[in-house]
Image: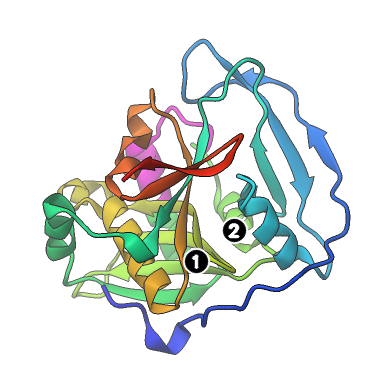
């Protein structure tokens, strides 16, 4: 569960940035993929230029997420169910169930790879989607689509690969390293190993990696209270949510 020492990212010192003004656009409404009968709309902006890293560091602290070269956040009419969340890594203490998750996966080896897609990763990704998200919007993604998801980045991005003792790839996580902690963009794993709770294990690994680098948080994207698919995120406490008043503790 220890992060690779050879690829550790040292903590960066905060500084004052002069980030160029952002241009934002509102996308058309589409059916919400999480809550039946609701519609979602996103506000999106480009992550570009020499200040791309600084841009997204600031945007992430305002609740934005990333997809390819763009940053977005929900702007749904009459709905605020999507809450950006981050674990306070420096205060995290695993409970008994998460300790069991760590123990079940202690034989795995994690390595940080460049943001370059491989056919081995894609095969696992496709298996995961087919088994776990067959009705999702990502189903049917070809290798070229997967490559874009992995490689279209202007940030400090890695793919964290998790292999068993035989060297077989069993899980992977696309991660952006921000000034105050890692942001989990997308993770996937072997659905036949569901009992190992690999999704939760990858979050545990990111928390440990953040602390090892002197970073404060692990960004986990959006949490929706009414969505069972999102419930695992609240296992990691203390966890903050971004509210109209800024970041506030949701569960401690």
Write the residue at 51% across / 35% down: 83
Percent of width and height locating residue 40: 62, 23
Query: Is 138 positioned to the left or the right of 195 in the image?
Result: right
Q: Nearer the viewer, residue 113 or 200?
A: 200
Residue 126 belongs to the span the image colors magenta: yes
Query: Is 250 positioned to the left or the right of 237 in the image?
Result: right
Numbered label attached to residue 78: none
Q: Mark 1 and mark 2 in contact? Answer it, CB < 8 Å.
A: no
Label 2 residue SS: helix
Q: Quadrant of residue 161?
A: bottom left
What residue would you read off at disc 1? 118
Magenta stretch?
A: 125-138
Numbered label attached to residue 147: 2
Label 1 residue SS: loop
Query: Is 172 positioned to the left or the right of 204 in the image?
Result: right
Q: Nearer the viewer, residue 87 or 72?
A: 87
Percent of width and height locating residue 195: 15, 48
Residue 157 belongs to the span the image colors magenta: no
Q: Nearer the viewer, residue 245 or 11?
A: 245
Compared to 76, does 244 lie above or below?
below
Measured in 3D between alpha carbons, the distance from the residue under mark 1 to the one under mark 2, in whole angstroms, is 8 Å
Is the residue marked by circle 1 packed among few (<14), some (14-19), or many (20+) residues within 10 Å? few
Compared to 25, does 184 lie above or below?
below
Of the image marks 1 and 2, the number of the one nearer the N terminus = 1
Is the residue marked by circle 2 packed among few (<14), some (14-19), or many (20+) residues within 10 Å? some
Write the residue at 82% across / 70% down: 50
Colour theme: rainbow
Q: Quadrant of residue 231?
A: top left
Percent of width and height locating residue 227: 38, 26
Percent of width and height locating residue 234: 32, 41
Write the residue at 32% across / 28% down: 228
């Amino acid at each position: 569960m220890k992060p690779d020492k050879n690829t550790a990212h040292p903590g960066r010192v905060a500084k004052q940035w002069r980030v160029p003004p952002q241009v934002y656009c509102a996308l058309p409404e589409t059916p919400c993929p999480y809550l039946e009968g609701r519609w979602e709309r996103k506000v999106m902006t480009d992550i570009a230029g020499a200040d791309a890293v600084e841009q997204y560091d600031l945007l992430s602290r305002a609740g934005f997420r990333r997809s390819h070269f763009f940053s977005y956040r929900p702007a749904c009419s009459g709905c605020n169910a999507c809450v950006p969340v981050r674990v306070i890594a420096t205060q995290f203490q695993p409970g008994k169930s998460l300790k069991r998750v760590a123990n079940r996966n202690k034989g795995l080896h994690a390595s940080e790879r460049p943001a370059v897609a491989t056919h081995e990763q894609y095969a696992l990704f496709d298996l995961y989607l087919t088994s776990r998200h067959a009705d999702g919007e990502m189903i049917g993604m070809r290798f070229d689509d997967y490559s874009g998801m992995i490689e279209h980045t202007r940030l400090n991005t890695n793919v964290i690969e998790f292999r068993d003792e035989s060297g077989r790839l069993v899980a992977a996580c696309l991660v952006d390293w921000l000034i105050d902690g890692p942001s989990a963009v997308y993770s996937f794993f072997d659905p036949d190993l569901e009992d190992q709770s690999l999704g939760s294990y990858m979050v545990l690994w990111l928390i440990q990696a953040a602390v090892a680098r002197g970073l404060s948080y692990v960004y986990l994207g959006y949490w929706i209270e009414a969505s069972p698919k999102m419930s695992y995120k609240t296992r990691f406490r203390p966890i903050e949510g971004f509210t109209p008043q800024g970041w506030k503790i949701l569960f401690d």
